[in-house]
Amino acid sequence: MKQRLLSLDFFRGLTVAAMILVNNPGSWSYIYPPLEHSKWNGCTPTDLVFPFFLFMVGVSVTFALSSRKADTGGHGKLMLHIFRRAAIIFAIGLAFRLIPSFDFYNLRILGVLQRIAIVFLIISILYIKTGPTARIWLCFSFLVIYWLLMTLVPVPGIGPANLEPGTNLAAWLDRTVMGEQHLWKQARTWDPEGILSTLPAISTGLLGIMTGDWLRRKDKEDAVKVSWLFVAGFLSVLAGLVWDGFFPINKSLWTSSFVLYTGGLAAMGLALSYWLIDVQRYQRFTPPFVAFGRNAITAYVLSGAIPMIFKGMSGGMFRGYSGFFSPLNASLAAAITLVLLMFIPVWIMYKRNIIVKI
């Protein structure tokens, strides 16, 4: 029987709600700095949202697949299930970019949902086919390999290795393999969810798997699990800050220092949530976020689909709120309103115990 942590649903739901909030301001011209992504190097609270989600994907894998992993005779069927789920999530990500124009020539191939699909696929396979020690080695090997590639390998046609927008090795690979017309439309010379940076993103998911393995241990007291998880997270944050001096913390490149820094913060946040919610049983405040967490992909898809269907929705709310608030607050109010609108369907699903399984 699957073990389920309320803190896991809560933390994932909090992350999804934050993701919807920062992705849907009333006006992109009026955003509070903490609700913006870093221009390049550095890390804002908004930069934490996506790595936190991938981290939680890893944690969730251990709880969802552990019992089926033990049944070695059913691995073939389990693999088909994993591939199917990853393919559906990837396809939904592509559909977002195709609808309504169906412009295949300028279709962005990669994106947020596509990265979630790829990371889920690879870490799930690794979880089933490898042991904890091998996964630890793979996680940190990916980070070191990515660091060496990005800082030592010359960029063809450009020159020495560099970490600048559009001229680094990851950007060159994206343009070479996919073509500029299939990249992130805000740049067209690189993609924040590109090919090479998927390697360290896999490490983010593997950090989540390590965390899930630790929380599932039956031979450790809850206080011990929480304490050591918090300490491990803190040390990971410190390691990320040290590595920042050699390989800057950067979400767009998903640098190795970014992985350790954000993964450490996610571990500390989950440790605190686990202690408060699952151990101390402070649960009265959790239902709204648990509702988002139990149908996380559904909530995210709806938050992208509804503004797409109702063109100008966020802008209309911004103009309406502008009569009462400053531009910054009007933009924030529009974003909060969309979060509340997305809350309605996920709350109904939560109350009826409906979980959309892809």
Image: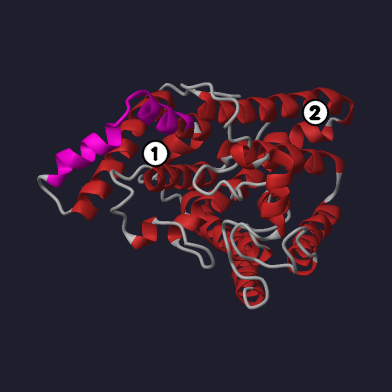
Residue 214 place in picture, x, y as percent: 70, 54
Give amino acid for label 2: Met
Residue 220 place in picture, x, y as percent: 69, 58
Colouring mode (rainbow / by chain / secondary structure / one colour):
secondary structure
The answer to whether residue 50 is magenta is: no
Element on which disc 1 rests: helix
Q: Residue furthest right?
A: 73
Residue at the (16%, 43%) spot, across then down: 321
**Residue tagged by mark 1?**
287
Quarter where residue 46 is shown: bottom left
**Residue tagged by mark 2?**
79
Precedes in sequence: disc 2 or disc 1: 2
Element on which disc 2 rests: helix
Q: Main secondary structure of the magenta part?
A: helix
* Extent of the magenta region: 301-322
Tag 2 and tag 1, C-beta contact below 8 Å: no
Asked if one can make out residue 336 in the rendered structure from this viewpoint, the answer is yes
- Where 249 falls versus 356 (above or below)? below
Residue at the (15%, 38%) spot, across then down: 320
Residue 144 place in picture, x, y as percent: 78, 65
